[in-house]
Image (tube, rainbow, N blue to C red):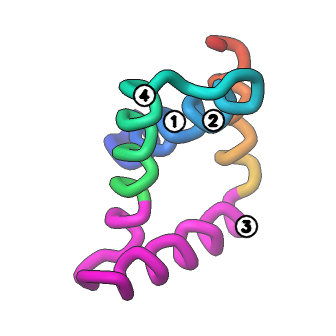
Amino acid sequence: MSEFLRLLALYYACEIAAETQFPAPDEWTRCMGHYHAVKVRFAQDLTGPAAQIEGYRRWKEWEAMNPDVVESLRDRARRRG
């Protein structure tokens, strides 16, 4: 699995876990780190607030263009959870 997909898998695992219980503070911090890392990955060379907004927008566009990959990663997270 590429580093990019591994990062997404970590985020989706957090997302799936949060559907059933509120995360403990340390888990919440870890998951927010994954969330921000994903946005940074998609923001590329942008910085500051624009990077957060544009990174999120590009991420959601990527998800819309890759629904099979997203569902596969989420399914994997559900099976492990």
Q: What's the CA distance linking mark 2 and mark 1?
A: 6 Å
Q: Which mark is residue 73?
A: 2
Residue found at x 30% / y 76%: 44
Q: Which mark is residue 64?
A: 3
**Which is more foreground, mark 3 or mark 4?**
4
Query: Magenta region: which residues?
Result: 39-66
User: Quick one: label 3, few (<14), some, or many (20+) residues within 10 Å?
Assistant: few
Of the image marks 1 and 4, the number of the one nearer the N terminus: 1
Helix or strand or loop: what does disc 4 sit on?
helix
Q: What's the CA distance linking mark 3 and mark 4?
A: 31 Å
Q: Report x, y in % for residue 23.
A: 55, 26
CB of mark 3 within 8 Å of CB of mark 1? no
Query: Which quadrant is the C terminus positioned in?
Result: top right
**Which is more foreground, mark 1 or mark 4?**
4
Q: Which residue is mark 1?
A: 9
Q: Which residue is mark 4?
A: 25
CB of mark 2 within 8 Å of CB of mark 1? yes
Q: What's the CA distance linking mark 1 and mark 4?
A: 20 Å
Identify residue type, mark 2.
Answer: Leu
> Is 3 contained in the magenta span?
no
Of the image marks 3 and 4, the number of the one nearer the N terminus: 4
User: Quick one: label 1, few (<14), some, or many (20+) residues within 10 Å?
Assistant: many
Of the image marks 2 and 1, the number of the one nearer the N terminus: 1
- Residue 39 quadrant: bottom left
Q: Is residue 11 above or below residue 26?
A: below
Residue found at x 75% / y 31%: 19
Q: What's the CA distance linking mark 3 and mark 2?
A: 14 Å
